[in-house]
Image: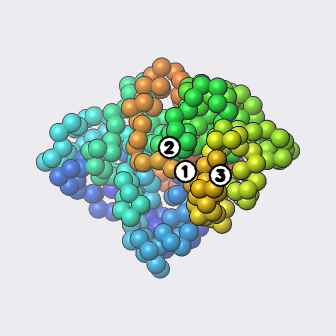
Amino acid sequence: MKAIVYRKYGSPDVLSLEEVEMPIPRDDEVLIKIHATSLNSYDVDLLKGWPFLSRIFQGLRKPKNKILGTDVAGTVEAVGSDVTKLRPGDEVFGEVSTRFISLGFGGFAEYVCAREKNMTLKPSGMTFEEASAIPQVASLALGALRQNGEIQPGQKILMNGAGGGVGTFVVQLGKHFGAEVTGVDGTEKIDMLHSIGTDHVIDYTKEDFTNNGERYDLIIDVAAHRSVFRYKRSLNPGGAYGAIGGSVLRFFQAGFVGPLITLFGNQKIGTSGGNPNDGMDLICALFEAGKVKPVIDRTYPLVETPQAFCYFMAGHVKGKVVITM
């Protein structure tokens, strides 16, 4: 089968299309013929071998797992002996990776093996491209929205980096739960954010939301580059801030300084995340009800995966970038 392979850390230039062996499913796995997959920020991190901590599991000098890509959508081709729910021919989607240490990727290829429990049946009205754009970012969005407990109607949420994959789901899910959502991103994403229902949009090139005097019940941040103390002053009493991505320094500050702020105050500061494939049944139901829809910026064929990475890394993606077979 064809796959996009990388044998050393670096830029998209190290990616190449190669013929590799077909994977064989284990007892609890299914073999999936991939129709579409999508890029995530973590794919870029693993490509670069950064942060360096990831190399402890992925390989210090070169990657052990040579095929990136964790979000897949496709058709079940074969099943392991312990598989009970899925059958060949089922159309499924999900995040292949189950835990950080496993780094169970392989989505940038024609076929991949995945645990049965990681796959969700794809709604008939959802395209494979749309399905591939959902798993990781939707799980992260749901986890972040529950940073401080369940969202209550009328709460004020700010999403910093609202125009990306996670952000577009936070906006739509936040609106579904009855929150008032403010999205922060660059000028080129403003119209798109209005189109998906964002209540208020802030252009970060023109305004710093930490200086405008507004207060929020929840701030979710995929572009953390300020001190956590600046975010703290934009929170209401009892509010919460969760960092998902951004500057490594600021992310670790949120992870280590944030709990101390939480301990001695009435606001919750820390990092945020989600468990792989959590909430996919909810997402499917909301999709079928017309409440949630993945935003897809561009689609590339498998052979153009390096170009897709270049576009993704330029930082102007609206929603997701999808790779098709």
Mark 2 lies on a secondary structure that is: helix
Quadrant of the drawing holding the N terminus: bottom left
Q: CA distance from mark 3 to mark 1?
A: 19 Å
Q: CA distance from mark 2 to mark 1?
A: 7 Å
On screen, residue 100 versus residue 266, left or right, reads left
Q: Amino acid at mark 2?
A: Gly
Can you see residue 6? Answer: yes
**To which residue does mark 1 refer?**
272
Q: Are marks 3 and 1 in contact (CB under 8 Å)?
A: no
In x, y percent, where is residue 32? 30, 46
Whichever of callouts 2 and 3 sits on the residue coming sooner in the sequence is 2
Whichever of callouts 2 and 1 sits on the residue coming sooner in the sequence is 2
**To which residue does mark 3 refer?**
265
Front residue of 231 and 99: 231
Mark 3 lies on a secondary structure that is: loop
Residue 274 higher or lower than 294, as above or below: below
Residue 160 higher or lower than 306, as above or below: above
Q: Amino acid at mark 1?
A: Ser
Q: CA distance from mark 2 to mark 3?
A: 23 Å
**To which residue does mark 2 refer?**
143
Q: Are marks 2 and 1 in contact (CB under 8 Å)?
A: yes
The residue positioned 79% from the left and 44% from the top of the image is 209
Q: How is the image coloured?
A: rainbow
In x, y percent, where is residue 102? 36, 62
Residue 315 higher or lower than 14, as above or below: above
In x, y percent, where is residue 69? 45, 54
Whichever of callouts 3 and 1 sits on the residue coming sooner in the sequence is 3
- Disc assigned to residue 179: none
